[in-house]
Amino acid sequence: MSAHLDHFGLRSEPFSKEIDDAKLWLPTSKQDIVDELVACVHDRKHAVVTGEPGVGKTCVLRALRSALSASQSFRLTYCHNVTLGRRDFYRHLCHCLGITYGATAGDVFLSLSKHVEELTRERTLPVLLIDEAHMLHQDTLDHLHILLNYSWDSRSLLSLIMIGLPDLDERLTKRRNRSLYSRLHHRLTIDPLSPSDTGDYVRARLTTAGANKELFTSDAIGILHEAASGSLRDIDRVADKALRLSARKKRKLVERDAVQAVLRTDGLGAP
Ligand SMILES: Nc1ncnc2c1ncn2[C@@H]1O[C@H](COP(=O)(O)OP(=O)(O)OP(=O)(O)O)[C@@H](O)[C@H]1O
Ligand SMILES: [Mg+2]
């Protein structure tokens, strides 16, 4: 076991990105978003979710996957390789769905429509999750609303959830994309963490790793919060380094000076 885990009596790395879906930290603010997305797919509607880098967008999708895992009614397809042209995007989508497709863009689209209709007959709703959607090519974006437009636009054969940086909202509200945007019924924002969220998050991750007492002082959390500006990924990185540094110094707690020392070399800047 690593020395810092041993030193603080932890069973596993507390700030690793390898976290089970079932162990994700879900405060009310995040649980509300997951609940709204669950309602969205049950209603066969579409959603857009935006937030700054590292606020936990992809983890919210993982929590959604976990929330829907007990139901046979949904087939989730996660797509994050979106910097592709329209035809390659559809091919990638077919590949994710495990269906064979022809050579032309028309063939690919046809295979996709047939597959979606087959799923409908089996009473399974495909849910297409497009992560990093702010990077979609415009010609793919132009086509997406066609995917949502089956049977003379009278039925939804799939539920589309687009996730990305705030630029995604900016792109969708542009005149050219209004047709797609108007079909996105749920428009959600994941906010950066508040100061008390940061404390709760650090505590929750440490508890999951086996801590049975506070390991970060409130001063240390305050500085961590200020430097990370509500990004969970930044918190993870700095908290992990501060934990290791404090273990090397044989400290019982992670204190303000340990976080400051990490920040001096981290690039976020020490407050
Ligand atoms: N709900 C959560 N529970 C536990 N850890 C989380 C949670 N959300 C985020 N994290 C931690 O923060 C890291 C970043 O989260 P995530 O990848 O979801 O952010 P993101 O908003 O998708 O970032 P990006 O904009 O760069 O894609 C994760 O790897 C994980 O360690
Ligand atoms: Mg992400």
Image (tube, grey):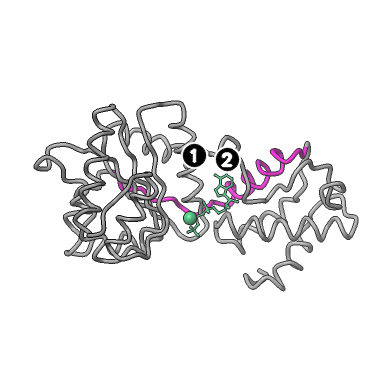
Q: Secondary structure at mark 1?
A: helix
Query: Circle 2 is placed at which residue position?
Result: 24
Q: Where residue 256 sits: x, y (%)?
A: 76, 60
Res. 113 image quadrant = top left
Cβ of disc 1 within 8 Å of ligand 1? yes
Tell me the residue at 49%/37% (across/down).
28
Residue 24, above or below 270: above
Cβ of disc 2 within 8 Å of ligand 1? yes
**Quadrant of the rendering where the C terminus is positioned:** bottom right
Q: Where residue 144 sits: x, y (%)?
A: 24, 54
Q: Residues within 10 Å of mark 2 (few under 14, many from 20)?
A: some
Query: Circle 1 is placed at which residue position?
Result: 63
Tell me the residue at 61%/50% (across/down).
198
Left or right, residue 55 beside residue 82? right
Residue 23, above or below 7: above
Q: What type is the residue that disc 1 sits on?
A: Ala
Tell me the residue at 88%/54% (across/down).
251
Task: Inspect the magenta stretch and tell me whether residue 263 lies in it.
Answer: no
